[in-house]
Image (cartoon, grey):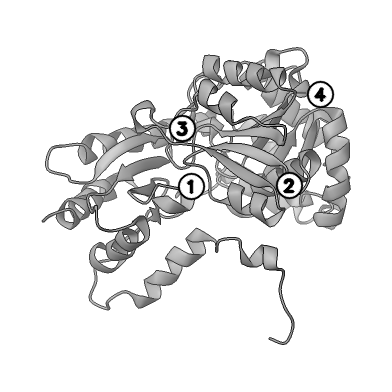
Amino acid sequence: MKFRVSEQIEKVGFPPITEVKGWVAGRPGNGPPLIDLCQAVPDYPPAPELLAYLKEQLDDPRTARYTPDEGLPEVRGAVCDRYRRRYAAKMEPDHLCLTVGASQAFWLAIMTLCRAGDEMILQAPCYFDHPMALEALKVRPVFAPFDESGKGLPNPEVIGRLITPRTRAILLVTPSNPTGTVIPPALLTELYLLARKHRIALVVDETYADFVAASPHELFTIPDWHGTLVQIMSFGKTYALTGFRAGLLAGSPEVVQHALKIQDTMVVCQPHLTQLALKFGVEHLDDWVEANRLLMDFRHNLFVNRFTQPGNRFRLAASGSFFAWVRHPFSHLNGRQVARRLVDEAGILCLPGEVFGPGLEGYLRLALGNLRENMIPETIRRFREMGGP
């Protein structure tokens, strides 16, 4: 290559899932069948009635056209209705911008809130795309350290000590990716008040919120919630539409208006077909979503029960919903080395802990979305054999 790429981009880590999936080609030919615990994707298909509806929409040429940058008014209105059902939210359509997945919503949030040289506080372990995006934009990620005894829950006192004049936001993910831990509503409110006190944003990524039984929090009931809160949401897991990239940014009308400057230059709008799928989902599929929440909860509980039986040297540090956060037993190896051995020797694909923040080489993330009930005993057998002397 005769030209140079940006030195800033050269410093950003490579996408971990792409890296780990690249190891599969080098597996021994006689290895066991692959069990994919790498990417958090539900294994079940979209609701049949949703697919039937979308097939009808493809016959309408208007479906191939642009929509307003922020999304169709009727779609945003339907989404607001669902927020009112789930959160008792004080929300209107002008609080929302529909995005190409939660990752793009996060980019809108960063670019609206931060300048190069600013700081954002992240709770470790954190979703790897978040520090990657911050580093690409020259915003410094500041990590609140992982406390295993507290299952990785954020500590307001610790986070408060990390706030500096350069801090523009606190970023939280609940349920956590990678630990699955849910931040209790009272703790979220305490962190909201901390952010408000310091006049910084509280950015909450709730990609997996629809896999939590109760209303996740009460922040949207605060009359001026959008003066401090910026929410990132994805409906890809909710409706098993990960390839449709159904994301959302929620915030004040002012934040949304500024975000649209970036939206227009980045993607223009969420795909029209995705918006139609989202509207159908929020209007018709609450019972279907709840049934899948119960399914994933059952699988998770079964996995945890079997995984924590005596004799397994891999230790469960935290878990919930789609994820298990596991401490591996090899003190002389980092997470990448253990994850590579699991691919080669046990046929298990998972992510190393160090991609989720500094000092986490002793951990692995297991994504349970692909793990059907009948696969759980075999998966755990392989861990037990791999963890032997």
Residue shown at the point (32%, 49%) measured from the top left? 362
**Which-is-in-front pick, marks 4 and 2?**
2
Q: Is the residue 114 above or below the residue 184 in the image?
A: below
- Local packing at callout 4 (Cα closer than 10 Å; few below 14, some 14-19, many 20+) is some
Q: CA distance from mark 4 to mark 1?
A: 36 Å
**Which-is-in-front pick, marks 3 and 2?**
2
The reply to whether residue 44 is visible in this rendering is: no
Residue type for callout 1: Gly
Mark 3: secondary structure:
helix
Q: Quadrant of the C terminus?
A: bottom left
- Local packing at callout 2 (Cα closer than 10 Å; few below 14, some 14-19, many 20+) is few
Mark 4 or mark 1: which comes first in sequence? 4
Mark 2: secondary structure:
loop
Residue 45 is left or right of residue 295, and the answer is right
Mark 3 or mark 2: which comes first in sequence? 2
- Local packing at callout 3 (Cα closer than 10 Å; few below 14, some 14-19, many 20+) is some
Residue 27 is left or right of residue 233, and the answer is left
Q: CA distance from mark 3 to mark 4?
A: 27 Å
Mark 4 or mark 2: which comes first in sequence? 4
Q: Which mark is residue 341?
A: none
Residue type for callout 3: Arg
Residue type for callout 4: Glu
User: Disc 4 vs disc 1: Cβ atoms closer than 8 Å?
Assistant: no
Mark 1 or mark 3: which comes first in sequence? 3
Query: Where does label 4 land, which residue?
Result: 92
Residue shown at the point (46%, 32%) measured from the top left? 293
Query: Where does label 2 land, which residue?
Result: 117
Residue 3: quarter of image? bottom right
**Which-is-in-front pick, marks 3 and 4?**
4
Query: Where does label 3 land, which residue?
Result: 293
